Image (tube, rainbow, N blue to C red):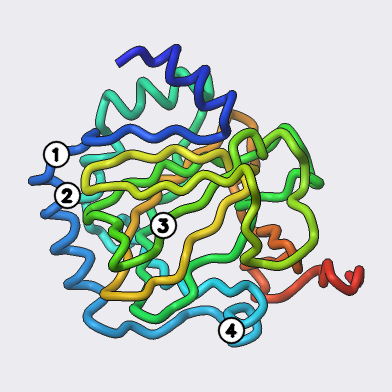
Amino acid sequence: MNTQELAKNFWRDGYLVLEDFFSAQLMDEYQELILDHFGASPDFLHTDEFLQKSATEVIPWFPQQEGRHQFDTVEQDTRLTTLTDAILGEGWYPLYCMTMFSRQGTKGQAWHQDCDPQQNADKFNVNRLIYTEDIRESIGGQTLVIPGSHRRGTITIGEVDEDFPDQVTLTPCKGTLVLLHGHTWHRVRPVVGGYRVSTNYRCCPKGTPEEITDICVYRNMRYQFATSSIVEDRLAGEV
């Protein structure tokens, strides 16, 4: 693994995809734990207002916070930490491990940035996403990204699920690792069959506030998770 070349590609595109990074055996172990936690039809945790305006129907779980130390295996993988070192430099730190579950018939996620470039263009998080099951056409839930958009500033105002001419579709298979800059514009397509699962080992460069992902920027709003409230209606221009 040429970590310096991979880091260069990450900073060029704002994302990185590495297939077959984790073993099928480990992914199967994680998948069993995830499905045991969520069951067949878990409840949403966000407010109805957020679900409606964000077109985001994802249910989070923080397994390490519940003592599920099996999820430490990925976080402590030396290949992952070495790659993160190459991308972020010394002093980066992990935020949390968050598993995201989407039920059949849900909207996925609208275009957004995980943290707000307007607050500080030099402060951001990195998503380190693993996939414990294939993302398939019959299931939906593919991730769309816009290469280089982490350098464009705040995501534009407009339709929350608009197609862009330069968007790229990611369809990760079991064992794939995807790294995604927190300012990269991205969304997830609707889940049309079964369910969709991904697990995110978020991290930040040295000096980044731990609450960097508290305010998420959508094309139609800024949303603060700590207060479960819309802090700006971008379509109306109101704060």
Q: Residue at x 32, y 61 (%)?
A: 137
Mark 2 / mark 3, whichever is N-terminal: 2
Q: How crowded is mark 2: few (under 14 residues within 10 Å), some or many (20 or more)?
A: some
Secondary structure of the residue carrying tag 1 is loop
**In this view, the mark in front (4 or 3):** 3
Q: In this view, does 103 lie above or below 96?
A: below
**In this view, the mark in front (1 or 4):** 1
Mark 2–mark 3 Cα distance, whole angstroms, equals: 19 Å
Q: Residues within 10 Å of mark 4 (few under 14, many from 20)?
A: few
Type of amino acid at the residue the image marks with label 3: Gln
Mark 4–mark 2 Cα distance, whole angstroms, equals: 31 Å
**In this view, the mark in front (1 or 3):** 3
Residue 23 is labelled as 1
Q: Which residue is drawn at 51% across and 44% down?
A: 168
Give the residue at mark 3: 142
Please provide percent x and percent y for residue 186.
57, 51
**In this view, the mark in front (2 or 3):** 3
Please provide percent x and percent y for residue 180.
50, 40
Q: Tell me if residue 24 can be seen.
A: yes
Secondary structure of the residue carrying tag 4 is loop
Residue 72 is labelled as none
Mark 1–mark 4 Cα distance, whole angstroms, equals: 37 Å
Mark 1–mark 2 Cα distance, whole angstroms, equals: 6 Å
Q: Residues within 10 Å of mark 3 (few under 14, many from 20)?
A: many
**How many numbered circles does the render carry?**
4
Q: Is residue 165 above or below residue 32?
A: above
Mark 1 / mark 3, whichever is N-terminal: 1
**Mark 2 and mark 1 in contact (Cβ < 8 Å)?**
yes
Quadrant position of the C terminus in the picture: bottom right
Mark 1–mark 3 Cα distance, whole angstroms, equals: 21 Å
Residue 27 is labelled as 2
